[in-house]
Image (spheres, rainbow, N blue to C red):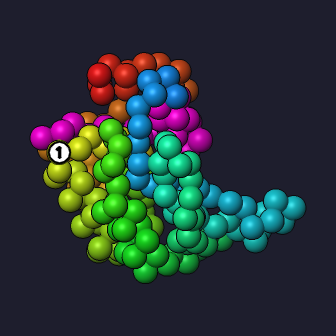
Amino acid sequence: MAKHIFLTGEIQVGKSTAIRKFLANTGKSADGFLSHIVEVDSAQPELGRELYLARFDTERGETDSRLAARVRFPNFEVYTDVFDGHGAELLRSAGARELIIMDELGRMEEDAEAFKAAVFARLDGGQPVLGVVKMVETPFLDAVRAHPNVEIITVTEQNRDDVPRLLEKLFG
């Protein structure tokens, strides 16, 4: 079985940045998905933010982005059908590269059964996964962290500059 590495840590500590630096430093190819947050209107932060799921491929860049949730703290409007359709397809179609990226798994996927099944199919599979998992407790995220093929690395302000080199060692 392949070893899968998931980074965790506080918001904006540099988890996704560490993955990008690792990929840039090693030239390893990867595909999978990225999630990214966009402010609806930076002049009016009270309007909230939108979460998008995008295809990630080191050779093709980020493409095929879909709106997966709207966040107006403390309320979340999650589009489970986007996770179950688009998100699950991004995971099923990944695997043409050396690594599968899952950036990031969070609480919004909790009710997305097809998406969760696609995540666990990849974790049970033979291709290495590099991902990010939020530091919150949910049944889904707890199961990802407890998966026998998953190793968790906590990224902090103190170690974040060392994480790309650690990933190089772990992924050879």
Magenta span: 1-23
Q: Residue at x 40, y 62 (%)?
A: 90
Place of residue 21 in the rendered image (x, y in percent of width and height, measured from the top left):
53, 29
Residue 69, quarter of the rendered image: bottom right
The amino acid at mark 1 is Gly
Residue 128, quarter of the rendered image: top left
**Disc 1 marks which residue?**
126
Residue 108, quarter of the rendered image: bottom left
Q: Residue at x 49, y 51 (%)?
A: 56
Q: Is residue 154 visible?
A: no
Please give left or right for residue 5 compared with residue 108 in the image. left
Q: Residue at x 47, y 48 (%)?
A: 57
Please give left or right for residue 57 compared with residue 51 in the image. left
Measured along the vertical axis of the image, is residue 120 above or below residue 103?
below
Which quadrant of the rendered structure holds the N terminus?
top left
Place of residue 78 in the rendered image (x, y in percent of width and height, measured from the top left):
50, 76
Which quadrant of the rendered structure holds the C terminus?
top left
Measured along the vertical axis of the image, is residue 99 above or below residue 105?
above
